[in-house]
Amino acid sequence: MGAEEPTPENYTLLQGFEWNVPADGKHYKRLHDAMPSYKHIGISNIWLPPGCKASSPNVSGVATKWGTKDELLALSSLAKEKGIGLYWDAVLNHKAAADKKEKCHVIEVDSNDREKQISDRKEITAWLGFNFDGRGDKYSKQKYHWYHFGGTDYDAATGKNAIFQIQGEGKGWSESVDDEGGNADFLMFADLDYSHPEVCEDVTNWGKWIVKEVGLRGFRLDAVQHFSQRFTKEWIEALRQEHGDLFYVGEFWTGNKQDLIDWVEQMGRKFSLYDSPLLNNFSNISKSEAADLRKVFDDTLVQDMPVNAVGDNPEPPSCGDKLADLCLARKLFAYGELNDYWDNPNCIGWVRRGTHDRKNGCAVVMSNTGPGEIKMHVGGEHKGEIWTDLLGWEQGEVTIDDEGNGVFKCPGCSVAVWVNKDAEGREHFPVNFDSDIYKDAGKQNGDKEEKEDDKE
């Protein structure tokens, strides 16, 4: 009988940007400088922002707000050195900020039912011409014209905003999309038509190129229910043949878990989705006093397809800067058989029993009312061990009895993560991770202003 395989390490994906990132062209450098810290707290992969240019000039011109290509490649090189993967945020549904206007024939459709025509066929002038003058033909000779799109939302001749379905031979909304709004194909701006072979070829070539150029391990795809699922499957297969298996996670906003399940099934379960119903449950429970914690997984994707569900967990102020500690605790100790203790609606607990090569395990207690306390079984192999809360919020010690049980507590409206105080890795707690990625940027801006003042 051969040796047991090593237990795979838990993965954690960090969203490496947010809505309010300053447009100072320094974000790739910020991520680069923070990379060693991310590795230390257990981050496995970083989701990078879409590297597209701005639609209009700002303080940094029309270049990406994140930084230069050289800085991106330096970030990629360090990530590879640290063993951290990079995922690219890909918006494949539409284009915006065209270079020129073009005339095309359209029909106007109902915004609540895109299958319902509400105007006769007519001609409009729309921003649908993309010449890519800055790029030229360096990476691709493809230019985009009105016939590469299925719809648009603005008539430049009249100034009217509406949903216009572009007319022409073989034109129509994709049938390989969700049925939201009658047909979910159109979302915004210039909607790409994946029935056109030139569009499919160009986007596929871009996917192959960006993986090689940046050294990507995967993609986060925006608004997957709004563009052709048929093309998405073909695109993934083309990239697989070129680069092997990559990781793909998609954004599909819905409160109906069956929509997510159906979409994943149609992808052959080779794709993950953000679990939007789970995020809704997190929100509802956090806003409701004494909500039933045991219902957090009700009607979620993770309940039925845990392998294909990706959780999205922001760090609210109530987290007390402990998100990094939780990430590292998960990386080091959350392995093996899972035993739930969900008898109380307002105080729940669970135990991870460990594996043959990650033996320590952990015990977690959580309460959304007063202080909590649960007797839990962690295993006779731990008898005599002294366990403490690695978050430091619950004081005291728990000695595991001869049967492998312990009584574990947590403060009110809080959580405690109990682990053997002598377990390998406990020396890394508290993590003391500085989550303010912008503070050096502010200092740099201040230094620059001082230098300008000196010149004057």
Image (spheres, rainbow, N blue to C red):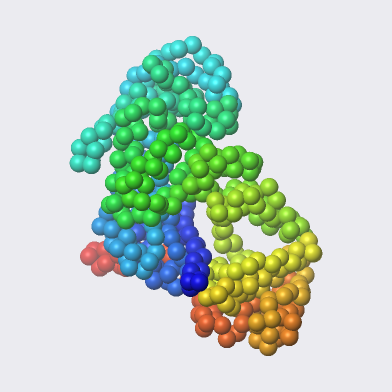
Q: Residue 442 at what x, y percent from top left?
A: 39, 65
Residue farthest to the top, as pictured: 120
Q: Is residue 42 visible?
A: yes
Which residue is depicted at the point 51% across and 14% down? Answer: 119
Whether residue 269 sits left or right of residue 167 in the image: it is: right
Which residue is depicted at the point 61% across and 82% down? Answer: 420
Query: Where 177 falls versus 396 (above or below)?
Result: above
Which residue is depicted at the point 42% across and 64% down? Answer: 438
Residue farthest to the bottom, as pictured: 384
- Figure quadrant of the C terminus: bottom left
Query: Where 59 falls versus 333 (above or below)?
Result: above
Whether residue 313 sits left or right of residue 96 in the image: it is: right
Q: Residue 142 at what x, y percent from top left?
A: 26, 33
Query: Where 384 falls versus 107 (above or below)?
Result: below
Residue 24's quadrant in the figure? Answer: bottom left
Q: Residue 161 at what x, y percent from top left?
A: 48, 26
Residue 419's quadrant in the figure? Answer: bottom right
